[in-house]
Structure formats: structure tokens, C-alpha cells
Amino acid sequence: MALKSAIINVMTMAAKKAARGLVRDFGEVEQLQVSRKGPADFVSVADKKAEKILVEELSKARPGYGFLLEETGELVGKDTRRRWIVDPLDGTTNFLHGIPHFAISIALEEDDKITAGIVYQPITDELFWSEIGNGTYLDNQRLRVSGRRDLLQSVVATGIPFAGRGTAADQKRFLTEMATIMPKVAGIRRFGAASLDLAYVAAGRYDGFWESGLEAWDIAAGILLVREAGGSVTEFNGKTNMLKSGEILATNTNLQGPLTRLLRDASKASATVDSGSAGN
């Protein structure tokens, strides 16, 4: 049985307490009070309640740690070396449409390095967790990324630009990426929650995942999950500034090179199209 550290237990208890309200509200999704935060980007009362619970519980357990939160933004703590990076409801649009695919994501950042992370799916009661140097687990089961080497046998996931997120150029670039990768793989999936996409890569359910335009709270915990499961996580160009750039490619180590090359080819093709359009 995997032994969870004190910090993982703190994160788990906070997530499960916040999840109880999410599960109740999900069951009454049609009665939720919903405000518009932007085109196709909703925030619910459930989202805010979950964030409040997480802040309260994590602060109680570790006073002084700072926070980076989806709804509230940054809260600077007395301990400037450590902060929680929290998404109380990743997959809000799924949640509000009654689609049971969403998660709570919590990461601990210490001295600018992610050292612990969990992704919890309340509906399936799946807890993905990891601590630096100690591997990645689904509950008590050790996880490893897939061992597939052939893209033609691989299933990869992505995120698709939508109304209110991404420019027209971003949308064109994504379509070029799809056109480049789609003929080379067994399938592409879009489930609408980046934290779970990364957890699924760590579990070997997906062989890879790519997306741009993300925020730190979408991916912080998932980055550690994939790395500690033996996978590779970079930006499309191979650099590792994902939390700031919002661009991520997560794969098993066998497919990192081939997918990086495909994304590079897509970037060149997109730049050529943009250059030609500018000249007309």
C-alpha cells in the first residue's frame, strides 16, 4: 500500500471536503446560480464555494503559505517560498452542462518547483496524487505512462479553442495542428479538463496531450503527475516554462520526439499560411 505523506493527506482532505459540495450541486445543476465570466467561460456558485473551502482547509493546515487561485488570483503568504496552486473546478463548462468529467487540482510549489500535486475527480472518486521523487499513484496503485512507441497505435488528447478564448490566429494554428497530427495517430480526444487529461497521460490512458493558452492552475499538479509516472512534459519547442507560457506537451518518453516534430511542422505550416495571407 502506498503511504501518503502528511502534505498529500492535507491536500486530499481539503479536496474531498470541497468535493462534497460540488457533487451536491452537480446533482442540481439546473438550479445553480450562474454568472457569465466571459463568452463560453462560466463561473458557478459551486466553483466559488469550493475555492473558499480549499483556501480555509489548506490555510488551517499550513498557515502562511500563499495561494495562486483561479477565481481570486494570487494571495501572498508570510511564507514566500511556498504557495498552493489551486483550480477548485477544472471543467466548469462540463459541470454546468451535466457532463460528469471535472476535477479539483491542487499543487504545492516550493522555491518555484512543484513538489506535490493531486487531481481529484469527485464523480468517479479517483484520486491521482504525486510527490517529487516518490512516483505517481491512483489511490494506492502505482502509475506509469504508457509504453507505446508507434504513433499510429496511440491515442492523444488536446484542448480546442472556443469562444472568448484564443484569437482567430490561435484557432487557425490549432486547426493546422489537428490536420498535422490527426492522420498520424489512432485517435484524438477532447474531454474538456486539462488536469484530468494530464492525469490520464500519467495513468497510461492517453499516450500524449497537447494544448496552449492554459493557466498555471490548469496544469501545475498534472505536470508532476506525468513526470513522476515516467513521462515527459515540455512546451512545444522543448523548453520547460509551461506554468508561464501556458503551452504544454505531455507524453511518454517514446513519443515526445515524434509529437514535438509534428507540432513544429504544424507551426511552420501555420506561419507560412499567415505569411501568405498577409501578402494578399
Image (cartoon, rainbow, N blue to C red):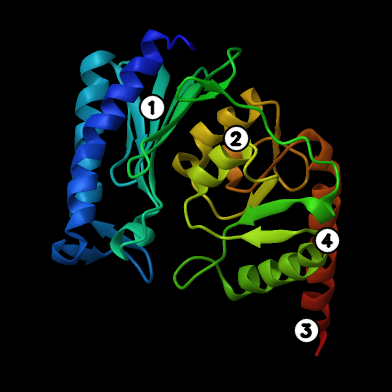
Q: Is residue 77 visible?
A: no
| Label disc, if present, on residue 58 of the rendered structure | none
**Residue 234 x, y percent position in the rendering:** 70, 39
Label 4 vs label 1: CA separation?
A: 38 Å
The earlier-in-sequence mark between 1 and 2 is 1
> Given contact means CB atoms under 8 Å apart, are the residues at marks 3 and 4 in contact?
no
Kind of residue sitting beneath label 3: Ser
Label 3 vs label 4: CA separation?
A: 27 Å
Instruction: Please state if 79 lies on the left or on the right of 228 as rendered.
Output: left
Q: Quadrant of residue 13?
A: top left
Q: Which residue is mark 4?
A: 184
The earlier-in-sequence mark between 3 and 2 is 2
> Given contact means CB atoms under 8 Å apart, are the residues at marks 3 and 2 in contact?
no
Label 3 vs label 2: CA separation?
A: 42 Å
Q: Measuring 63% from the left and 68% from the top, which residue is drawn there?
A: 170
Closest to the observer: 242 or 25?
Answer: 25
The C terminus, quarter of image: bottom right
In the rendered view, tell whether residue 272 sits above or below residue 210: below
| Label disc, if present, on residue 277 of the rendered structure | 3
Numbered disc in front, either 4 or 1: 4
Kind of residue sitting beneath label 4: Lys
Instruction: Please state if 221 lies on the left or on the right of 242 as rendered.
Output: left
> Given contact means CB atoms under 8 Å apart, are the residues at marks 1 and 2 in contact?
no
Numbered disc in front, either 3 or 1: 1
